[in-house]
Amino acid sequence: MKLLSVIVPCYNEEENVPYFYEEFIKNESFFKEKEIDWELLYVDDGSKDKTASEVKKLHEKDERVHLFSFSRNFGKEAAMYAGMEKSKGDYVVIMDVDLQDPPALLPEMFSYIEQGYDSVATRRVTRKGEPPIRSFFARMFYRMMKRISKTEMMDGARDYRLMTRQMVDAILEMKEYNRFTKGIFGWVGFNTKWIEFENVERVKGETKWNFWKLLLYSIEGITAFSTAPLSFAAVMGVLFCIFAFILIGFIIVRTLVFGDPVSGWPSLVCIISLISGVQLFCLGIVGQYLAKTYMEVKRRPIYLLKEEI
């Protein structure tokens, strides 16, 4: 029998843990028909509630349920990496515990794997239930990434993805500390089938992603898979150098012709402030890449386990 590893990152999701299990096992007849065994890997990302306790209760009922608990909160990216590293399946799927990734899609996803695809990815065609401002910036982010990055990133893409072992092993070869898995999926390549579904709201609880966290996550993606911001900083530097030379020439000519070198100081202050702001902005771009490099060269572990069942 083939083995399916189901990776379920969790952070303060004690209410959703049992609901996810109940919904997932509704596919039990499909798995038996296809002769697929499964293991359910709950990755507890340093939860402060009773998430780990709820998973342990499920493990007592079903030994196919496993728990990997972090020593602290390392983030969803680390949780997904840990799950892939601990998985043993011929196929691996990543799913959110809040049931925004419908387990009912699994039979359709397996049908494409049987057709020869290495990966079946999902994307939302609607963002119903999301704040309009968040949806707008999310669409702008993916539109921008298509222009500045060579890596495929689909608008509305979810982490919900079924993969073959070969693709998972390729992802595990990428051991970078600053991880942006949506970009990594596209970078490793492989033959991927995209399927669409309507947005599903959470069963219980509230999302852990606020606007600020999503903004930082988008910056992570830009710096991980594009050097366009560095090129932008370089181009801005050249343009302002040219502008400065033109301005110097203008001031010299004006002084010689009109003999009035004093007037115009308000505009000069505005120009100096503008150029200083651009310099600091470009320095900040360089600083972001330098910070990522700093974290990479430390070679710290991506996660630390406190408990494993």
Image (tube, helix red, strand yellow):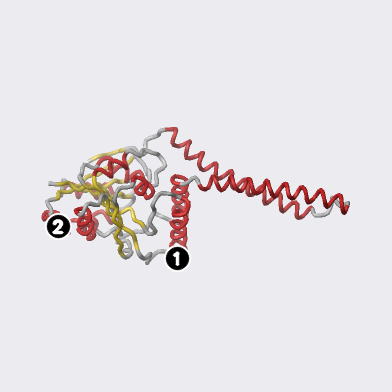
Measure the C-alpha gap from mark 2 to mark 1: 38 Å
Residue type (three-letter) at the residue carrying disc 1: Pro
Residue 135 location, quadrant? bottom left
Residue type (three-letter) at the residue carrying disc 2: Phe
Place of residue 260 in the rendered image (x, y in percent of width and height, measured from the top left)? 87, 52
Number of residues whose C-alpha sits closer than 10 Å to that of mark 2, classed few (under 14), some (14–19) or many (20 or more) = few
The residue beneath circle 2 is 30
| Residue at 29%, 46% in the rendered image | 43
The residue beneath circle 1 is 132
Q: How many marks?
A: 2
Q: Earlier in the sequence, mark 2 or mark 1?
A: 2
Q: Residue 185 bears which disc, if any?
A: none
| Residue at 75%, 52% in the rendered image | 268
SS for tag 1?
A: helix
| Residue at 34%, 37% in the rendered image | 304
Depth check, front residue: 149 or 36: 149
Place of residue 90 in the rendered image (x, y in percent of width and height, measured from the top left)? 20, 45
SS for tag 2?
A: helix
Place of residue 177 in the rendered image (x, y in percent of width and height, measured from the top left)? 40, 39
Place of residue 23 in the rendered image (x, y in percent of width and height, measured from the top left)? 21, 59
Q: Do the CB atoms of the residues marked 2 and 1 lie less than 8 Å apart?
A: no
